[in-house]
Image (cartoon, rainbow, N blue to C red):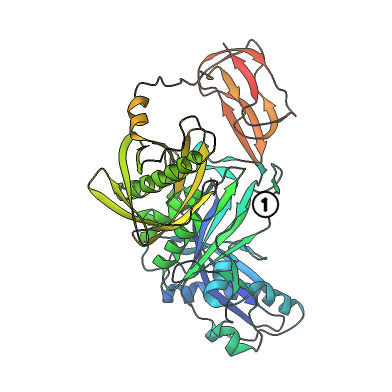
Amino acid sequence: MFIEKFIESPRHIEIQVLGDQHGNIVYLNERECSVQRRHQKVVEEAPSPFVSPKMRKAMGEQAVALARAVGYYSAGTVELIVSGADTTGESFYFLEMNTRLQVEHPVTEEITGLDLVEQMIRVAAGERLAFGQEDVKINGWSVENRVYAEDPYRGFLPSTGRLVRYRTPGTQTPFASSEVEKRGSEQVDTRFSTSLETNGRVRVDDGVAEGGEVSRFYDPMIAKLITWAPTREEAIDAQVAALDRFEIDGPGHNIDFLSALMQHPRFRSGALTTGFIAEEYPDGFHGAPASDPLIDRIAAVAAMIGLETDARGAEISGQLNGHEGVAAERVVRIGGRDLHVSFDEDEDGLIATIDGDRSLSLAGDWAPGQPLFDGTVDGEPVAIRVERKGRRWKLTTRGASHLVDVWPPHVAALTRHMIEKVPPDLSKFLLCPMPGLLVSLTVKEGDKVEAGQPLATVEAMKMENILRAEKAGTVKRVEAKPGDSLQVDAVILELE
């Protein structure tokens, strides 16, 4: 029999250590990595909202003692499981030590001002650390989100394809060297960050470029989005603003999900555990909830976008009905609701009146064809990703995508008489939900299957995904064999 301690409300917290070849070792505070899915980190932050100064000192000193006991030097991470149920901070337990640089190291760099890669190079060259433990401080707060090539709306299935469009938020500009570096060395910190309209800064670490291919053979991470601000709340708000301006077209991605996490009341309160995602999204992710004021903003922008597009269309020469003016009124259908939006001009832009009783001021330079509306609504910055879907618009902001119809009022009245197109019933087919390799097939033609029975295994991005029968039936035909490379929605087998 094997018995191990049960940790209540477990939190994943790790200590960054740094040592040289002369016996000097320091700890560079902690990082919280509790927000995980399938044991893979999604969000990291430094410092932890749970760790007190006393707890930080105890954890840090034990991490240093461990590194010293094994003669370790360079950067390393001591990972711990911490009981969130014990507010004394004394219930932390060793998990493992990673003798390398972690994916989440940027948040430590942001709050300490140290370039860890530079420090590793200096240590490898035999230099002494230019600072001591007393020089290591905590400056502000930093949050990192991992941008993955996966579709949260389809159970986080891996996604592949060409990066047709890849635009990160902001433009890179240098920032001043840190106080730690100033006290300990004359070297200048040459890292770069970018700024948004917040009290902080945003940084993107990536290894991809527009036009590149996200394949099924490697880890799904596309980029790391890091923000820094004086406070935790401001750093989280900077994440939301940056995620709205992060443009990726091609493979599916988790940007909406990350934005929803940043807005979640429980995350913002700091009440985290390693079960956060499973506990808060037990039925999967369907987009962040949108408040009525947010729906009004989306509707106003949608109406403006529809109006601008129709106005451009009206300028085409040779039209049979001549060049009639475009009425400044639209009906926006969003989430099953019809909102009537009319516009008046003012010196700063447009005034949108919704349903005759709510007014919003819009300012921005959006033109037909642009994939991002980046302007202001009632003086507040707003970024909405814009995509045309047939006659509809797909508008994405604040962690959710909204399919929106925009019509002139007389057209909106007639649409109620249109027959909805019913999608075909594909339940008799087992379809490949993602590009991948068919590893195994557990049935053959003529076999009877039950609902929920495993039928096939598809491997993509270092993960195996078991595909199950949606309903009972008999295998009528098998269209693929183990070893085949399959595309999305490729038919594996058919049931009858």
| 207 to the left or right of 203 | right
Report x, y in % for residue 301.
40, 48
Q: Quadrant of the C terminus?
A: top right
Residue 424 percent location from the top left of the image: 51, 18
Badge 1, how many Cα within 10 Å: few under 14, some, many 20+?
some
Task: Please state which of residues 256 and 43 is positioned toward the viewer in this rendering.
Answer: 256
Tag 1's secondary structure?
Answer: loop
Horizontal relation, residue 34 to residue 268: left or right: right
Going 65% across and 41% down the picture, which residue do you hit? 160
Res 424 visible: yes
Q: Is residue 199 left or right of residue 495?
A: left
The image quadrant of residue 225 is bottom right
Which residue is depicted at the point 47% across and 73% down?
56
> Does 16 sit above or below residue 334?
below
Q: Which residue is mark 1?
A: 210
Which image quarter: residue 249? top right
For residue 474, above or below residue 173: above
Q: Residue furthest right?
A: 125
Residue 449: x and y in percent read: 56, 16
Q: Residue, x 68% and y 35% (percent of image)? A: 436
Q: Position of residue 390 (x, y in %)?
A: 52, 33
One can see residue 70 in this view: no
Nearer to me, 477 or 75: 477
* Up-down relation of residue 149 to residue 456 (above or below): below
The amino acid type found where label 1 is placed reads Glu
Q: Is residue 274 above or below residue 47?
A: above
